[in-house]
Image (cartoon, rainbow, N blue to C red):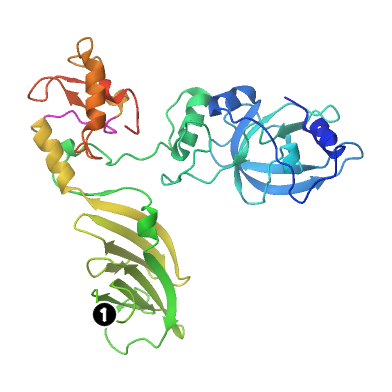
Amino acid sequence: MRNPSVLALVLLAGPAATSAPPACRCAQLPIETYFENAAIVLVARADAVTRIRPPAGAERLEVRFTPVFRNGAFKGSMDGVRFVTPVGTASCGVDVQRGETYIVFASGGDPQDPAFVWFTTCDGSRRYIGAPRDYEQEPFIGLPNHRILPRLFELADGTPSPLEPPADFHTSPACWEGLRIAHQGSPPATLRERVRVASIPGPAPDTGGVTSPNGAYRFWTGYRPEGEVLGDAGGFVVVAVERPSLLRIAAIDSRAPPQPTWVNEKLLFIRFVWSRVQFTDLLVDVERGLPIYEEAARYSQEAFEKYREACSGQCPCFVVPGRTAELPAPPVSRPSEGQEAGLHDLTRSLAFLDADWDGRVFTEPGGTAYTVSALKGELGR
């Protein structure tokens, strides 16, 4: 790896900088290449950041990292290692902020101190934002944001990641005994933005409400139909929490009154209804006035009926629907030569193959012979 200190000295010796700082110029590479080139790979929180001004050479940031996954590094060892990055974008330094989490690809050593290892943007290091599926950018070439951690686990030792993005259902609907509500992780941004928590002027009503187990707080529910002049339409919950103001949790454009219930002395569970099948479950700490849990939920009658009708109740029960690793091997039948490409194109073009499709293509009636070729091993299909 190029020595960032030398690179920084060359840049500092050049013409006077303009108002805009020069940027690091490095071609973006696949995450596999960054992983292979690095001596140490980790996803870690920056717990301390110290600016170092050595007698000779460029300034650098020394960072104390605490791993947040695997209880250590994905590759290499952190024992006795001091992580440093150049100061400034021109030197390809990572803009490290205390408390933030970073994907670190570190390599090389410092001739003055072998304990130092460098990490730069050229080596692939960058801030890790978490794993929201609706994140539009691809931080690494050809790798969606929510697949970064699973890929690191695969590169590290080939074991399945415990952080694999959740499937649409915990088990295949073909295996269910009856209808159920399935939970789907974080709600999409369009629904999260419609849940609003605010403090509003009091006082609380003198009567009614549902009292908390400690007898200190009460909540009331309400629903404002579309067309009323007072604020946004939708369901809401108002909570009295021994303060001059009230806590109001509202779901804009929800389609039914909310369904709250006390979980304990201060935690309030609320289910907001967006449609016949879509809900948001919320857990609110009323003393702090903050949601501490939020998840999308779905009434899966349609999926249950689709799976049962397609399989006549005899479908194998997969741990994760659509994952080829869970299918029996070898399958009962395979497509003939030339048929595989046709099946692949067919499954990509049919508009009615929605998220409830479990990924299998049957080559004979009755659901007894099938092929997995259409998936090509793709989780996203």
Give percent across and percent down for residue 132. Answer: 44, 46
Residue most toward the top?
A: 337
Q: Quarter holding the C terminus?
A: top left
The residue at the point 41 percent across, 70 percent down is: 197
Of 10 and 233, the residue lying toward us:
10
Label 1: how many Cα within 10 Å (few below 14, some 14–19, many 20+): few
- In-image side of 75 versus 159 (left or right): right
Give the magenta part as a residue range: 314-322
Q: Quadrant of residue 198?
A: bottom left
> From where the camera sits, is residue 66 visible?
yes
Q: Quarter holding the N terminus?
A: top right
Residue denoted by label 1? 228
Give percent across and percent down for residue 40. Answer: 64, 29
Give percent across and percent down for residue 302. Answer: 15, 46
The residue at the point 66 percent across, 36 percent down is: 121
Using the image, determine if residue 174 lies above or below residue 285: above
| Kind of residue sitting beneath label 1 | Glu
The residue at the point 19 percent across, 48 percent down is: 300
Whether 379 is among the magenta residues is no
Using the image, determine if residue 108 lies above or below residue 205: above
